[in-house]
Image (cartoon, grey):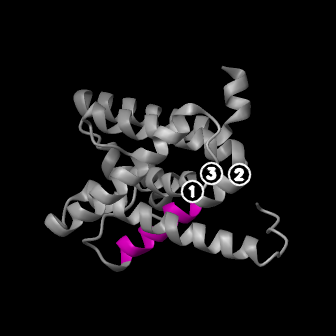
Amino acid sequence: MKQFLKKYPIISCVSIISIIVYVLQFILNVTSSINLIELLSIDSQNFKTYQVFSHFVTHAIHPDHIMYNLTFFALYGMTVEKVYKTKFLYLILLYVIIVPCLLHIIYVDFNGNGLSAIVCAIQILHLFTKPDMYYDKILQLFTIYDLVKTILYSFIKTTDISNMAHLCGYICGIVFCICYFVHKKRGQKSPSII
């Protein structure tokens, strides 16, 4: 376990925080009137600056939501963190946390943020990664399927929150990858954070 924490610090940290917040949400929902989602989510009536960062670890009470997000976050994120390194993954996390939150603040009805958006952005970066393990090829096929499904579904039902988060994550991932690869192709030295 210590090796995993050392090798994949971002994946480990986000997963552990998400699980702790989820368990606390569940316990507080059952035992008290404290609404942790109201305190941490950007959708709160009383917006606080920290909610820009705490929002992505809040999840619906239904366990499938967090299970799918964390599973795909780990599967895609391990390859991305291994190939592009921890600082790069940290940079894409910040980008995909801040951009959708700004859009949410500007357009109140926009809800394209959260761990789902982060997973989708990482999926795009994973598409441009040479498959290392046998499951990487399967994940790349799944990304193409999910991207097409998300785009088609957005024409049918545009107000679905999870679809908006997926679409926003894919768009953020595409923009991030274009900027990164254009910068890399120009032969410029990579920024020190990467």
Q: Which residue bears the numbered disc 3?
A: 129
Quadrant assignment for the N terminus = top right
The amino acid marked with disc number 2 is Tyr
The percent position of residue 145, horizontal first and vertical second, equals 35, 51
Q: Are marks 1 and 3 in contact (CB under 8 Å)?
A: yes
Which residue is at the front of the view, 41 or 122? 122
Label 3: state its secondary structure. loop
Residue 116, percent across and down? 39, 51
Query: Between disc 1 and disc 2, whose residue precedes?
Result: 2
Residue at 23%, 63% (x, y): give it.
152
Q: Which residues are magenta?
A: 93-105
Q: Examine the residues drawn in magenta and state their main secondary structure.
A: helix
Image coordinates of residue 139 in percent, x first then y, are: 47, 41
Q: Is residue 75 left or right of residue 31?
A: right
SS type, badge 2: helix
Q: Are marks 1 and 2 in contact (CB under 8 Å)?
A: yes
Report whether 69 appears left or right of 140.
Answer: left
Per the model, the C-alpha gap separating discs 1 and 2 is 10 Å
Q: Nearer the viewer, residue 84 or 107?
A: 84
Q: Secondary structure at mark 1?
A: helix
- Of all residues, the one furthest to the left in this rendering is 156
For residue 37, which numbered disc appears in the image? none
Q: Is residue 57 visible?
A: no
| 26 or 100, nearer to the observer | 100
* Category of crowding for the residue at label 1, using alpha-carbon neighbours closer than 10 angstroms: few (below 14), some (14–19), many (at least 20): many
Image vertical order of residue 83 relative to residue 28, above or below: below
**48 sits to left or right of 59:** right
* Three-letter amino acid code at the position of disc 3: Thr
Report which residue position mark 2 lands on: 84
Marks 2 and 3, Cα distance to the nearest angstrom?
9 Å
Quadrant containing the C terminus is bottom right
| Residue on which the image places disc 1 | 125
